[in-house]
Amino acid sequence: MNWPFTPSGRVTETYAAGLLRTMLETSSPSYHERELADFLVEAMTGLGFAAHIDDVGNAIGVIERGDGPTLMLLGHMDTVPGHVPVRSEDGRLYGRGAVDAKGPLAAMICAAAGAVDFPGRIVVIGVVEEETPSSRGAMAIRARHERPDALIIGEPSGWSSVVLGYKGKLDLRYTVKCAATHPSNPVPKASELAVSCWNALLDLLGPDASHAVFDRPGPTLCRLNADLTSASMDLSIRTPPGFDDEKLVRELRERLAEGELKVLNAVSACRVGRADPVVRALVTGIRRLHAQPRLVLKTATSDMNTLAEVWDVPMATYGPGDSSLDHADDEHIVLADYLRGIDVLTIAIAELAHLPGRTGDLVGAAPPPLRSIK
């Protein structure tokens, strides 16, 4: 890649595009992120970060520019499996992870490197295993790193949208074994018990359960292997704020005639207000690029959930890219939107130099209306 900086200290568009392309060319499915982490440490070091890989494999870069606030920008390096040939076509850059979430992470790196006037500490992190139930990378960050003064999570929101919250997630596994018997025997078979478990879950969640509505739970039958003698089933419930996970598990167990129900993973929903300082900073960046910001809620789950469970700090999720292309066979990002995302983040970083309780409250126009999307 060419010299990365303009005379004003901003990262050049040529460098930014080349950085993202190299990231896409570096395969990094979950549990196999090390090659990308090595590349990002080298790239961030060249951009002026003090960079290293921690003991779980996260790539961490730090820029110290004074004793002001600490801002953390956190995205994930891993992708779902599957190969999308890397190519540029009609202003779009194709590749696995282009939107989910190498595009947002690359935009964060470029914006942080070019934020020459920020008076504090900027920490950029590419975490491992976000696409897995454990979220091991983000779990390690929240356990070992000092809480920042503000946090931006890198996920595709669309360059002119800001995500205020995500549903939570409850992952369950039901297993059951039965004695071998003839199919005509009236005793319950393992396959039938698994179906009964699924039906009991739907009944407990009620007729209004939906993945399309933020304030309602949404169930998914993710996996089912079953015959007459054994069955194993994975269930996932996307949960709204305030949902009682323990009550649901207890009541579902009470309805099971046989078998075992295990909790594989649970994370709470998260949501910030429209007046959150990070939200307002990102909204300011979008408006300065002459767009009308959208504030959205997502019915999926991200590392924002994991960090919000323990860090009560200003935060929001932002990143260029169309989230409807997450995991798609034609995953791609519009390069112009990627560059706009860098500009929005650069402006937001400058706005966050004035965090509440340090140099005064953030001042901005009234936030736009809130929408709910998948």
Image (tube, grey):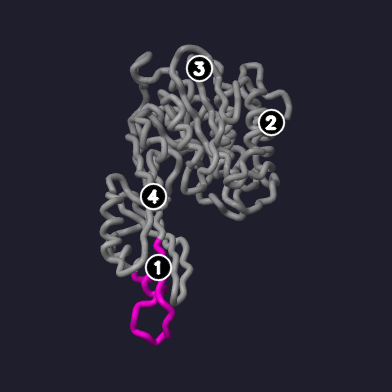
Q: Which is more foreground, mark 3 or mark 1?
A: 1
**Labels 2 and 3: the sequence-earlier one:** 2
Q: Which is more foreground, mark 3 or mark 4?
A: 4
Q: Quadrant of residue 272?
A: top left
Please report contact status of discs 4 and 1: CB closer than 8 Å, yes or no: no
* Residue 87 visible in the snapshot: yes
The alpha-carbon separation of the residues under discs 3 and 1 comes to 57 Å
Query: Could you tell me which secondary element the residue under label 1 belongs to?
Result: strand
* Residue 294 visible in the snapshot: no
User: In this image, 2 relative to 307: left or right?
Assistant: right
Please report contact status of discs 2 and 1: CB closer than 8 Å, yes or no: no
**Labels 3 and 4: the sequence-earlier one:** 3
Residue type (three-letter) at the residue carrying disc 2? Thr
Residue underneath mark 4? 169
Q: Position of residue 178 (x, y in %)?
A: 40, 74
**Labels 4 and 2: the sequence-earlier one:** 2
Q: Residue furthest right?
A: 2
Q: Which is more foreground, mark 2 or mark 1?
A: 1
Q: Which is more foreground, mark 4 or mark 1?
A: 1
Q: Residue at x 37, y 15 (%)?
A: 358
Q: Which residues are magenta?
A: 174-196
Q: Position of residue 311 (x, y in %)?
A: 37, 31
Residue type (three-letter) at the residue carrying disc 4? Lys
Residue 93 counted in the magenta span: no
Residue underneath mark 1? 176
Residue type (three-letter) at the residue carrying disc 1? Val
Please rate how many residues cluster around mark 2, counting C-alpha atoms within 10 Å: few if below 14, some from 14 to 19, many from 20: few
The alpha-carbon separation of the residues under discs 2 and 3 comes to 23 Å
Residue underneath mark 3? 118
Residue underneath mark 2? 14
The alpha-carbon separation of the residues under discs 4 and 2 comes to 39 Å
